[in-house]
Amino acid sequence: MNLDALLYWVGMAAVAVSALTGVLDSSRKQMDLIGALLVGVATALGGGTIRDLLLDRNVFWVVDQTYLVVALATAFVTFFLARSLHLPPRLFLIPDALGLALFTIVGTQVALQWHAPWLVASLMGVTTGVVGGVLRDILCNDVPLVFLKGELYASAAWLGALSLIGLQELGLHGIWASWIAMSVVLALRLLAIRFHLTLPAFAPRRSD
């Protein structure tokens, strides 16, 4: 499998996983089918759409509607499964971590192939990984995870994107670099959820 094929299938998996997380999160709000589909599709396609618009390239799911079909189908199936199962409220965080890892690496590689500078490429990876979750949380009337004082999220994505760029600069093949960087993002995010790893934050001001 060459790098382009890997990115295609990883991107497809990322779309499916992210659509699933969107619907699982929308179930907390007791949305109907259309609402859940909207949240699922926005979660699955939002980050890549913003990335492509910023890079001035054709939007990926407009060029290949298979991504849209996968997002809709996954959201549809997840909606009916979630209705019949009693799921923990935070269950969506696990597939969300996987989607973050997959989309971050795809976004970074796409930007590199578009000849974006390394710093821009790393931020395009973060954008691809994070924006779908931001749209999901906004549509569910929640404060986006990335803006909350909580476990590592965008920082995990950025470290993974920088790892990918660094490994390729050291001469590692893009396929192996992608797998390792995906593992970095996923491991950091899961460890952050498990052990509540956070970045420094502003402490509340004390009144005199």
Image (cartoon, rainbow, N blue to C red):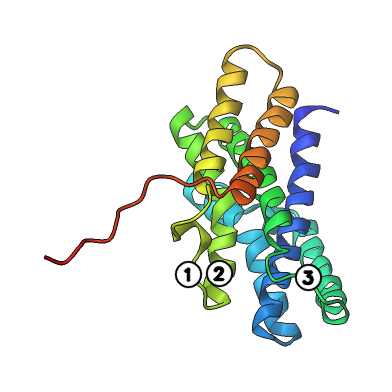
The residue beneath circle 3 is 75
Q: Residue at x 53, y 29 (%)?
A: 162
The answer to whether the residues at label 1 and label 2 have Cβ atoms under 8 Å apart is yes
Dot 2 falls on a residue whose secondary structure is: helix
The residue beneath circle 1 is 143
Query: x, y (%) of residue 118?
Result: 48, 28
Residue 16 lies left or right of residue 90; in this view the side is right
Q: Residues within 10 Å of mark 1 (few under 14, many from 20)?
A: few
In primary-sequence order, the first of circles 1 and 3 is 3
**Relative vertical location of residue 54 with respect to residue 163 in this rendering, above or below:** below
Which label sits on residue 137? 2
The answer to whether the residues at label 3 and label 2 have Cβ atoms under 8 Å apart is no
In primary-sequence order, the first of circles 3 and 2 is 3
The foreground one among 136 and 64 is 136
**Relative vertical location of residue 108 with respect to residue 145 in this rendering, above or below:** above
Which quarter of the rendered picture does the C terminus lie within? Answer: bottom left
Real-space Cα separation, disc 1 to disc 2, in angstroms: 6 Å
Residue 144 lies left or right of residue 89; in this view the side is left
Viewer-nearest of labels 3 and 2? Answer: 2
Query: x, y (%) of residue 15?
Result: 73, 56
Single out the residue that lies furthest toward the top: 171
Query: x, y (%) of residue 163?
Result: 58, 27
Q: Amino acid at mark 3?
A: Ala
